[in-house]
Structures are given as C-alpha cells and as structure tokens.
Image: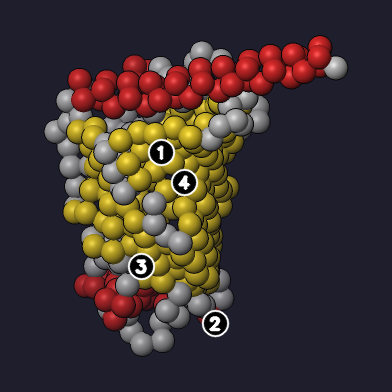
Amino acid sequence: MRGLLWIAVLAIAGWSGWWWFASETALKTAQGWFAARQAEGWQAEHGGIDVQGYPNRIDLTIERPAIAPPGGPWGWQAPFVQILSLSYKPWHLIAAFAPEQRLDTPAGPVLLTADKAQASLVLVPGTDLALDRFQFVAEGLGLSGLVDGRAAHLSLATRPAVGLALAHDLGIEARDIAPSPAFLSRLPPGTVPAQATLVRLDATLTLSAGLDRHAGRTRPALTRVILREARVDWGEIRAFVSGDLVPDAAGFAAGRLDLRLEGATKALDLAIAAGLVAPDFRASWQSALDSLTPQGEAITLPLTLANGAISLGPLLLGPAPRLR
C-alpha cells in the first residue's frame, strides 16, 4: 500500500512539473511574440497575460490586446482573447474571442460584435508548426462602422487538399445575412427580402509555399484557385459560380468562371445598388438579359478573366480581382 502511495505521489508531482513547464512555455512564448513584434516596429500591446487551467489545460488569457503592423492602416484590438489547449496536446489551440472587437482597415474602422466567436487551430506536430486545419465559427455576428450588417451564423474552415501539394480546401458559409437598411433603401421596393438566406464558398487554394513558422520568410502566395461553388440565395435571386483561376504576371485573376443566375433582373438591381454596375448601363444590361433569359428562365454565362478584366464575350464587366 505504501508503495502505491509513493507511486501516486510521484505521478502527481511529475504531472504537476509537466504542467508548470508547459504553462511557463506558453507564457514566455506569448510574451516573446509581443516583444518580437515591437522590435520589428509593430504596435503590439497588452494589459497582462495570465495562465490557468491546472491540471489538464493551458488557458492563456491576454488582456486588452492591440496589434497593428508598422506603417499600415490595418489593426486589431479587443478587451481580451483566450487561447486554450490541453497540456498533453499543445498543437491543438482553441481561441475564444471577446463579444466586441475592433478591426482597423484602410477604409476605416469596423466594430465586430458576436454572441459567440471561437476558432480552432490544429498544427502538424513538429518544429515547423505547419498548418493542418483551421475552423472559425461565430453566432449572432454584427458589423458596424465602415460596414453595417448582421449574420445569424458564420463559419470558415480549412483542411489539407487531398492529392495536391501546398493546397488547402476552404469552406465559408453565412446564413441569414441582414445588410444595412441604408443599402436596402437603394433597391427598388420588393427586389429582395431583408435577409439573404445563404452565402457559401467551396474552393481549393494552392500556394507557393507552406503555411508554417517559415511563412514570414517564404511569403506564401496564391498560385491557383479551384472554385467548386460560390453561391448566393437571396429571395428570388440564386447565383452559382464555378471555375478555375490562376494569377497572371500582374497578379490579376485569369481563367474562366461559369455563372448560373436565377432572378436576373432583380440581380441587376442588386448589382447597381452595390456599385458593381453603373446605373447608366442599366438599359443595355437589361436588354442583354431579356434576350438571354426568355420567359424568366435561368441563365448561364461564361465569364472570361484576362488582362486584368472580367468580360462576357465582347462586353466588359469590370476589373478582375487580384490574387496576389
């Protein structure tokens, strides 16, 4: 019996020692990260870092983080953020975000609110700290400031793509999205309901280098985007886009996209309100849609992206997005 007691005491002492080592490592890593960013000219401030969670978890709480790269308009700050992990599985991190966060952008600040916002990051065990998979989920998400709107649910997830090197599958889904009343007021009455039912993206992104601790030096860039589906369901408007894109020499997307559209006339009203189509071109667009969608049927359009522009046959639709 005495031997079993000693074994139990040694086991508890050993586990306590491991937890202390793991918690101190997490604390020093976080403190070192802020110090390293400050040395590089970043704004990297916090109001204190604390570690709890004994005996099985490492719960790191960072109070009042404020982070911004040097010389740029981007930045992020929050009342707190928690980074949680199991002491025996340090490569799996869970982040719990505060109900309010502020994101600074080149166009102005955005206040983010959420009933619940969490992220999960799983790394490949090893010294390279390579990304395995990532997931972000928010419920009751709200935006105000530069952009106003709400979404009942938002999720984003990545995982390694099967059979492709340096590629990750990306999925994004938002449900019950309510844009600002100011945006809806620019639409003709009855164009769309106050909420979009669904916005979804399913794609595979191929990069020039791995997403790991060397990314600051290797600077991974997009080399290919396989778009299996980008989808919007909003009232009578249903849009589906698929295609395969690569960056051209100037970094603009090049390739072909296939757009299937239901509710084309209302989609045109939506595009004009969003600033995607100039109002002066409404008549020509409506004439083209009427000829392509007899009796209100769905329309399928092959879109070409080349030389920094998107076009439908000879009709120029606008600039192509940048991939890098």
Q: Earlier in the sequence, mark 1 or mark 4?
A: 1
Q: What distance separates the C-alpha of mark 3 from that of mark 2?
A: 34 Å
Q: Secondary structure at mark 3?
A: strand
Residues 214 and 209: in front is: 214
Q: Secondary structure at mark 2?
A: helix
Please identify, in this view, whether the residue under mark 1 or under mark 4 is nearer the observer: 1
Q: Is residue 222 above or below residue 77?
A: above
Q: Is residue 40 above or below residue 196?
A: above
Judged from this view, the residue extending furthest toward the right is 1
Kindly check if marks 2 and 1 are in contact, taking CB atoms under 8 A apart as contact. Answer: no
Residue at image coords 21%, 25%:
38
Q: What distance separates the C-alpha of mark 2 from that of mark 1?
A: 60 Å
Q: Secondary structure at mark 1?
A: strand
Q: Is residue 225 visible?
A: no
Instruction: Using the image, tell me which numbered label, if any, was put on residue 10.
Output: none
Instruction: Using the image, tell me which numbered label, if any, was put on residue 295.
Output: 2
| Local crowd size for mark 2, using a 10 Å CA cut-off: few (<14), some (14–19), many (≥20) | few
Q: Earlier in the sequence, mark 4 or mark 3?
A: 4
Residue at image coords 27%, 20%:
36
Please identify, in this view, whether the residue under mark 4 or under mark 3 is nearer the observer: 4
Residues 267 and 185: in front is: 185
Residues 266 and 42: in front is: 42
Q: What distance separates the C-alpha of mark 1 from that of mark 4?
A: 9 Å
Residue at image coords 52%, 31%:
58
Kindly check if marks 4 and 3 are in contact, taking CB atoms under 8 A apart as contact. Answer: no
Q: Earlier in the sequence, mark 3 or mark 1?
A: 1
Q: Earlier in the sequence, mark 4 or mark 2?
A: 4
Q: Quadrant location of the N terminus?
A: top right
Question: What residue would you read off at disc 3?
Answer: 149
Question: What residue would you read off at disc 1?
Answer: 61
Q: Position of residue 3 (x, y in %)?
A: 81, 12
